[in-house]
Amino acid sequence: MSHQADPRIDAYIARSAEFAKPILRHLRKLVHRGCPEVEETMKWSMPFFMHHGILCHLAAFKAHCSFGFRHQVMETILDRELGKGEDGMGHFGRITSLADLPADRTMLGYIHQAAKLMESGRPARPAPKPKPKSADVVPAVLSAALRKNKAAAATFAKFSPSHRREYIEWINGAKRDETREKRLATTIEWLGAGKPRHWKYMNC
């Protein structure tokens, strides 16, 4: 084992079920052979292998082990070649013995390919697209009330998005019609006076 070995992974393997120990040791060796520069660590109580980010991870459970890569391109490749891991357990399904794994040469090829992807700088996971904030959509009842009160409408228009959102979320959060009507009336009153939703606490 290389100098990057983490003793916490030794301990993890030692306390794993007997069937899992040879699987974990073998996978660990393959990762180091496929990517000699890899570094080990523990995350979320499981062994992880780092190389320009998370390269791969392994885990042992009561009756099976799992092994998976982080990079999404590897997920696409392995899903195409091997099929989806059973019950979402890594990319190789429920591993109960070494016979459940592809040949060492194949595994080393996967590991080497994953390492090259990490080295490329291509994000392992694409940045999530920002979701539209539904809280920024003015509810119809508030729009109607603002049309009837010019002072409140002027205040609401001048407010920052965060101040407007506080009122919108307050009204949308009402579970009963009576509560919504009461909050709406208070909103128009406070807006008419130029007050933000939490004005009572601003001088505290």
Image (cartoon, helix red, strand yellow):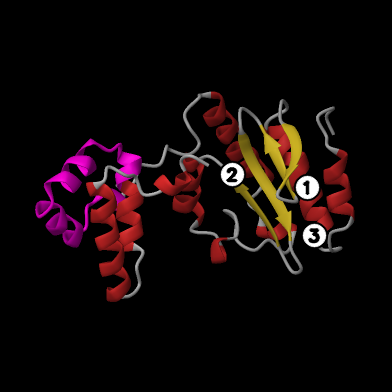
Residue under circle 2?
69
Task: Report the residue at 23% width, 43% height from top.
Answer: 156
Question: In the drawing, what numbered circle is on residue 26?
Answer: 1
Foreground pick, 29 / 185: 185
Q: Position of residue 171 (x, y in %)?
A: 31, 61
Residue under circle 3?
20
Tell me the SS state at disc 1.
helix
Q: Amino acid at mark 2?
A: Phe
Q: Is residue 172 left or right of residue 43?
A: left
Neighbourhood count class around disc 2 (C-alpha, 10 Å): few under 14, some 14–19, many 20 upward: many
Quadrant into which the N terminus falls: top right
Tell me the SS state at disc 3.
helix
Which stretch did the figure color magenta?
135-164
Q: Position of residue 12 (x, y in %)?
A: 84, 51
Foreground pick, 202 / 66: 202
Residue 147 highlighted magenta (yes or no) = yes
Q: CA distance from mark 2 to mark 1?
A: 16 Å
Q: Is residue 110 left or right of residue 31?
A: left
Question: Given contact means CB atoms under 8 Å apart, are the residues at marks 1 and 3 in contact?
Answer: no
Q: CA distance from mark 1 to mark 3?
A: 10 Å
Tell me the SS state at disc 2.
strand
Q: Quadrant of residue 30?
A: top right
